[in-house]
């Protein structure tokens, strides 16, 4: 684009301004003029000319900004163009705004989630425990009916009832799917942590399996239509002699008692037949068959004429004088029918007495987990911000590619790379002692089902009496579990998806409890594997089986108290004695082009390390105002002094022996003098490290007791942040 001679494009550099925890900022230029030269008019698709159809003013226009030496200030940013009469006016944006602009109008439903939609039944629930699926049914109290029943004695397996379980979707899987969909890459150590990988977002509403009995026979009223021939008296099709008031709903409209009767589906859906009884005296074994839409074949059914999907064998090889019970679940469309038929291979058999059976025909309402529909209420932008809040993340866009690096505040403020900017310091303009828009209590808040609840909220405390007393810094869209717990297989949190409503007793009936499904309830939880033989049961589907493991909920490290103390401690130390310096600096194009917000900048004249929060209105050749935030930071020492000798720290673990599942003998070597404290650290996976006992060098062996079974071990010399090798125990 052409510029007028002498036109200056002032730049403001900023990213993740710590003044506000809610907002994420981007670098930008001040508004500048573009002359309406022939070149510029063509480039902007004849914008402002009469009759033009240019889309330039309506979209993000990809833009790269260079200086006159070819150094790139902004690569693949975008510009917004407006008209000011004699000139066009432009502003160029860079940084993370590109990510948030790309996703700002989309919800999680835009992620093509059809491949994880499923019907909630025993198979899908157990598969979520045994397979590495993006969704998982996590045992918790969802305030529904029948969740968990402990065995009455050691010989009885506990029971998990699935009808009121709710699936959860893996946050790491969703996060990855978002970045792949929009063509962005991401990196950061937090994504390798168990806290991130084992984080689950619940389905936002109750999805229960329920049932309604449409027809129930009794043995005394159940008879069979008899078909006579020369040799045998056979029973070929079902026939029921109902009472008059039962006839209208449950049977086909054909009321002729001499013809076959059929059970009819009042609407499309899943249905179940339960059949039990004893055939008494019969001359041969028979099969009981469920025939679908067999009324089209006439009064008597031709067994061979019914094609395979049109019939189901409910029970094979039923023996004389033998009790049997069977259940069959299938789908029927509205108006379709089923009936029951006895058959055997020769189509010849004889009952000496009329078979007596109990038959129940039930309509099932099976939970259909449609993630695409229910996640349409959760914007992708809000989802990303929720994860950024919980891990105290700051993000940086690669200048040349669509790559984003996420680092924690701990990494940003305690273990960064540093640069000496002492020679670039010109003068201090002023300093402030109130940082941003913080108050004395800066609250992080969940949503709650109960008005006035705050039990999982917490705040960052700033001891400055000149600040406002309190403010809500982060208001999450995620719900908190209830303040009380449930005695479900040990205490568990309650994630409310159903509201219990007690129906008062009448003279005829006892009081009952109904369950009203709640909607738009998003919760976060973690899951913990339980190894135990357990029966899995669906009351509505009348199905059950066994599993050797399942997953139970945990809310560990998800209260805002835990989150603040885990991920926001470095920020608390900055705010506690806040010092914000506005200074003028000697900066040049190369400084701006290569500037890295991740680093800390040391300024000797100010006697400290600073986070550069903002570079205001950089113009080449002029002093540039910078907002500097003091950080309580001491760079690591790479050597230590022993008398007149300077030594480089050396730590080596040479052997580990497991004594018990949580006790280990650790052999190691250091070159440290006496009384240097070294920490033992251990990990179950090589990613999530825990700190064990302190050892005093030059001792060369310890017995280490751990809180979990460990496989990886290392030593840490805290004074210089020096680690030993990692010893992996097979």
Image (spheres, grey):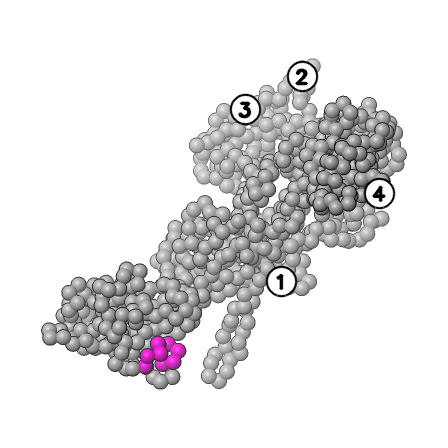
Question: Which of the two discs, 2 and 1, sits closer to the camera?
Answer: 1
* Pointer 3 residue: 652
**SS at badge 3:** strand
111 displayed left or right of 59 = left
Q: CA distance from mark 2 to mark 3?
A: 19 Å
Q: Which residues are magenta?
A: 247-255
Query: Where 22 sits versus 310, above or below?
Result: above
Q: Nearer the viewer, residue 423 or 33?
A: 33
Q: Position of residue 258 (x, y in %)?
A: 25, 81
Q: Earlier in the sequence, mark 4 or mark 1?
A: 4
Q: Nearer the viewer, residue 235 or 87?
A: 87
Q: CA distance from mark 2 to mark 4?
A: 70 Å
* Pointer 4 residue: 85
**SS at badge 2:** strand
Mark 3 touching mark 1, by CB under 8 A?
no
* Pointer 2 residue: 646
Q: CA distance from mark 3 to mark 4?
A: 72 Å
Q: Nearer the viewer, residue 715 or 413?
A: 413
**Residue 449 marker:** 1
Q: Position of residue 331 (x, y in %)?
A: 38, 63
Query: Where 619 sits versus 708, above or below?
Result: above
Mark 2 touching mark 1, by CB under 8 A?
no
50 displayed left or right of 320 = right
Q: Position of residue 81 (x, y in %)?
A: 76, 41
Question: Which of the two discs, 3 and 1, sits closer to the camera?
Answer: 1
**SS at badge 1:** loop
Query: In this rendering, does residue 568 appear at all?
Result: no
Q: CA distance from mark 2 to mark 1?
A: 62 Å
């Amino acid at each position: 684009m052409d510029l007028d001679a002498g036109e200056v494009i002032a730049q403001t550099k900023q990213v993740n301004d710590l003044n506000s925890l809610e907002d994420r900022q981007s670098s930008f230029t001040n508004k500048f003029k573009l002359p309406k030269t022939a070149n510029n008019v063509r480039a902007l698709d004849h914008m402002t000319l009469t009759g033009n159809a240019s889309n330039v003013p309506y979209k993000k226009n990809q833009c790269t900004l260079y200086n006159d030496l070819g150094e790139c200030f902004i690569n693949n940013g975008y510009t917004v163009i407006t008209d000011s009469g004699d000139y066009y006016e432009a502003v160029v944006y860079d940084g993370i705004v590109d990510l948030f602009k790309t996703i700002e109008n989309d919800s999680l439903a835009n992620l093509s989630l059809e491949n994880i939609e499923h019907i909630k039944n025993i198979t899908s629930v157990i598969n979520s425990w045994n397979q590495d699926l993006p969704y998982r049914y996590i045992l918790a109290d969802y305030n529904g009916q029948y969740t968990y029943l402990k065995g009455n004695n050691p010989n009885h397996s506990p029971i998990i009832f699935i009808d009121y379980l709710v699936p959860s979707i893996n946050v790491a899987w969703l996060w990855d799917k978002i970045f792949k969909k929009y063509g962005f890459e991401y990196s950061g150590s937090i994504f390798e942590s168990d806290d991130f990988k084992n984080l689950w977002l619940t389905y936002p509403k109750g999805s229960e399996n329920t049932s309604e009995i449409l027809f129930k026979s009794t043995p005394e009223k159940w008879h069979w239509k008899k078909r006579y021939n020369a040799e045998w008296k056979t029973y070929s099709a079902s026939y029921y002699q109902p009472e008059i008031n039962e006839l209208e709903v449950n049977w086909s409209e054909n009321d002729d008692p001499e013809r076959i009767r059929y059970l009819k589906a009042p609407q499309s859906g899943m249905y179940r037949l339960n059949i039990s009884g004893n055939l008494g005296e019969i001359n041969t074994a028979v099969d009981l068959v469920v025939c679908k839409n067999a009324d089209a074949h006439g009064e008597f059914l031709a067994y061979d004429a019914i094609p395979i999907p049109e019939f189901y064998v409910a029970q094979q090889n039923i023996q004389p004088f033998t009790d049997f019970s069977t259940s069959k679940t299938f789908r029927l469309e509205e108006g379709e029918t089923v009936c029951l038929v006895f058959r055997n291979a020769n189509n010849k058999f004889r009952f000496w007495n009329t078979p007596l059976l109990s038959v129940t025909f039930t309509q099932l309402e099976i939970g259909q987990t449609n993630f695409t529909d229910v996640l349409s209420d959760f914007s992708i932008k809000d989802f990303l911000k929720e994860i950024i809040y919980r891990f105290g993340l700051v993000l940086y866009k690669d200048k040349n590619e669509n790559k984003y690096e996420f680092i924690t505040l701990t990494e940003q403020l305690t273990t960064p790379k540093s640069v000496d900017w002492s020679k670039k310091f010109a003068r201090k303009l002023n300093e402030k002692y109130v940082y941003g828009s913080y108050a004395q209590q800066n609250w992080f808040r969940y949503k709650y089902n109960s008005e006035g609840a705050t039990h999982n909220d917490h705040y960052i405390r700033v001891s400055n009496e000149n600040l406002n007393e309190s403010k809500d810094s982060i208001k999450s869209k995620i719900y908190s579990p209830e303040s009380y717990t449930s005695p479900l297989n040990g205490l568990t949190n309650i994630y409310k998806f159903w509201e219990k409503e007690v129906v008062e007793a009448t003279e005829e009936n006892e009081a009952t409890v109904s369950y009203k499904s709640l909607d738009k309830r998003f919760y976060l939880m973690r899951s913990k594997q339980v190894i135990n033989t357990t029966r899995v049961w669906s009351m509505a589907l009348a199905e059950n089986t066994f599993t050797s493991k399942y997953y139970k909920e945990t809310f560990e490290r998800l209260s805002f108290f835990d989150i603040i103390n885990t991920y926001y401690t470095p920020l608390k130390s900055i705010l506690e004695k806040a010092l914000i310096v506005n200074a003028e600096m000697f900066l040049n194009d190369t400084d701006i082009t290569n500037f890295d917000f991740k680093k800390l900048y040391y300024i000797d004249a100010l006697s400290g390390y600073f986070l550069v929060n903002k570079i205001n209105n950089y113009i080449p050749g002029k002093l540039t105002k910078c907002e500097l935030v003091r950080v309580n930071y001491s760079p690591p020492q790479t050597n230590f002094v022993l008398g007149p000798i300077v030594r480089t720290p050396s730590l080596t673990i040479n052997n580990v022996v497991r004594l018990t599942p949580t006790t280990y003998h650790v052999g190691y070597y250091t070159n440290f003098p006496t009384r240097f404290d070294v920490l033992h650290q251990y990990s179950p996976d090589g990613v999530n490290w825990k700190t064990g006992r302190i050892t005093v060098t030059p001792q060369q062996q310890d017995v280490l007791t751990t809180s979990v079974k460990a496989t990886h071990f290392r030593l840490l010399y805290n004074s210089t942040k020096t680690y030993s090798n990692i010893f992996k125990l097979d």
